[in-house]
Amino acid sequence: MRSGAGGLYPRARALLFRLDPERAHDLVLAGLGWAGRSELALGWLRRAYAERDPRLEVRAFGLRFPSPIGLAAGLDKDGVAVRALAALGFGSLELGTVTARPQPGNPRPRLFRLVEDDALINRMGFNNAGVDALVARLERLRRQGQVEVPVGVNVGKSRAVELADAVADYERSLRRAWGVADYLALNVSSPNTPGLRSLQERGPLEALLALAGRLRDELGPRPVLLKIAPDLDDDALRTIVELAEDHGIAGLIATNTTIAREGLTSPHADETGGLSGRPLGRRSLEVLRTLRRATDLPLVSVGGIWDERDVLERLAAGATLVQLYTAFIYRGPVLLRPLHRALLDRP
């Protein structure tokens, strides 16, 4: 690893993992935000971690991705570390989940490491500074020419808004983010906002997807993707595919975190919230394969992707792009170069 970077994260992780998980997350994000304001730091990150090669490029839903390996939503909800995360070598960044209104999220503690299982459980509850703050930050970055990879904005429902008013709440966020996001993602699958997953049912989902179509007609073309839960049965997945195709959705993101808890050994296994990491991998792959049999839409695979084998397996199973989150927390930025080299070395 260049610049001695390979040995840095294991030592840093040993320190970070002594802290409360959310405190450690905030410190890392603040550090990345600082690095994004220093050209010297950004240059070091690129040399140490990034693997840029034109053979890695992927085109999907009208966008060019310098790599199929992106960062999943949830890590940088407010877009404070866009420049540094891109410098690490991610081929795309999905920011959010963001809501129309600022909200503090659920009470702490709300993030738990399941070290024995290579997993996390979170019940963050869409804590974010609101769509206006995120849009202002992205507008500034774009004016300064500092957005180097496609940036998606993942949109969810404000907790204070009743389910009956969800479409109007999504509409406000989508309108605000439409002009600054390379793509938008509708999050109807987090388990941490009461009732949110009911928006995956046919009636509510059709209303939300119809909204996306109306906004495309009014505001101009913009890829809108739908992020779904891993806990749906095959009939529900096929219904989602049908509605997505009928309403011109550009692609599906599969999957969000799971409420399942099979096979866990950590003492935190009974915490409520969404489980991510290695234990989600098998189900996320199953959902990917089911969706690929049902549709030709671009599919973004996320959930339990840990190493080179996982990335290659997801792409072979029909994923157009993949996203990481929990593996990035556990393994750090050193995992990106081996993943990219595995892609470059495949037959």
Image (cartoon, rainbow, N blue to C red):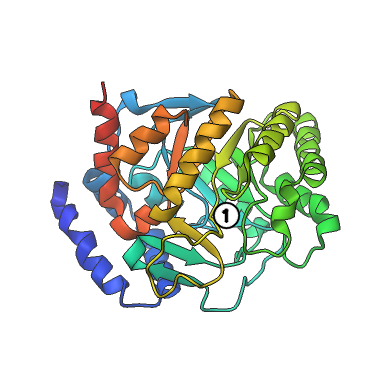
Residue beneath the point at 60% across and 49% down: 229
Instruction: Residue at 71%, 51% (x, y): give it.
Output: 173
Task: Farthest residue to the right: give it.
Answer: 164
- Local packing at callout 1 (Cα closer than 10 Å; few below 14, some 14-19, many 20+) is many
Q: How many marks?
A: 1
Does residue 50 show up? no
Residue beneath disc 1: 96
Residue drawn at point x = 37 percent, y = 34 percent: 313
Determine the residue located farthest toward the front in the rendered image.
263
Residue 64: % across, % down: 48, 27
Q: Position of residue 251 (x, y in %)?
A: 60, 32
Q: Nearer the viewer, residue 99 or 319?
A: 319
2 over 99 or under it: above or below? above
Seen in the picture, residue 236 relative to 130 is either above or below; the reply is above
As helix, strand or loop, the secondary structure at mark 1 comes to: strand
Q: Position of residue 180 (x, y in %)?
A: 61, 42
Direction from residue 6 to residue 110 in the image, left or right: right
Identity, as a three-letter code, of the amino acid under mark 1: Gly
